């Protein structure tokens, strides 16, 4: 079920805080194909790396979450997005991941 920005932000922060809350070690992005971006674009390893994504109600809510996380210290490259890009993804950066 799609989530509003407040609920999605809480879910992401809970995940990060459970796995290491140094926000600068994490990357956030928005995508219409989050698994493709995570595993192909950013080279996140499906097994072994820390990552998650969830669906926002719309692009505006997704951007609100992304902007808030970047303000809190997450790495991220906010880019103009397709209105269908409503998935917010995060991953813990590693030596093999690719940040844009």
Image (spheres, rainbow, N blue to C red):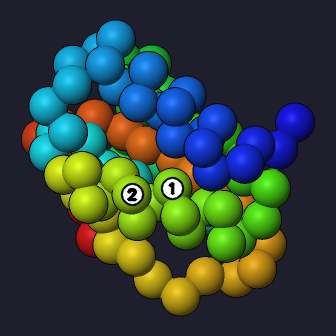
Which residue corresponds to the image point at 14% horizontal and 31% vertical from the top-left?
22
Image-quadrant location for residue 61: bottom right
Task: Name the side, left or right, on which 29 lies relative to 17.
Answer: right
Residue 64 spot, x, y in % from top left: 53, 64
* Direction top: furthest residue: 18
Residue indicated by mark 2: 68
Residue 20 spot, x, y in % from top left: 21, 19
Circle 2: is it few (<14), some (14-19), or many (20+) Cα within 10 Å? Answer: few
Q: Nearer the viewer, residue 23 or 77?
A: 23
Find the distance from the CA under tag 2 to the CA under tag 1. Answer: 5 Å
User: Mark 1 and mark 2 in contact (Cβ < 8 Å)?
Assistant: yes
Q: Nearer the viewer, residue 66 or 39?
A: 66
Image-quadrant location for residue 62: bottom right
Circle 1: is it few (<14), some (14-19), or many (20+) Cα within 10 Å? Answer: many
Task: Name the side, left or right, on which 52 lies relative to 33.
Answer: left
Is residue 97 visible to the viewer in this orientation of the structure? no
Which residue corresponds to the image point at 45% horizontal and 83% vertical from the top-left?
79
* Quadrant of image for the C terminus: bottom left
Which residue corresponds to the image point at 39% horizontal and 57% vertical from the top-left?
68
Residue indicated by mark 1: 65
* Quadrant of image for the N terminus: top right
Which structural element holds mark 1?
helix
Task: Name the side, left or right, on which 58 lies relative to 64.
Answer: right
Residue 43 spot, x, y in % from top left: 36, 48
Task: Name the side, left or right, on which 81 lies relative to 13.
Answer: right
């Amino acid at each position: 079920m799609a989530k509003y920005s407040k609920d999605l932000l809480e879910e992401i922060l809970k995940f990060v805080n459970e796995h290491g809350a140094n926000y600068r070690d994490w990357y956030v992005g928005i995508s219409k194909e989050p698994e493709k971006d995570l595993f192909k674009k950013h080279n996140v390893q499906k097994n072994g790396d820390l990552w998650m994504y969830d669906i926002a109600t719309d692009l505006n809510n997704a951007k609100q979450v992304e902007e808030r996380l970047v303000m809190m210290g997450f790495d991220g490259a906010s880019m103009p997005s397709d209105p269908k890009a409503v998935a917010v993804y995060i991953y813990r950066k590693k030596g093999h991941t690719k940040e844009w």
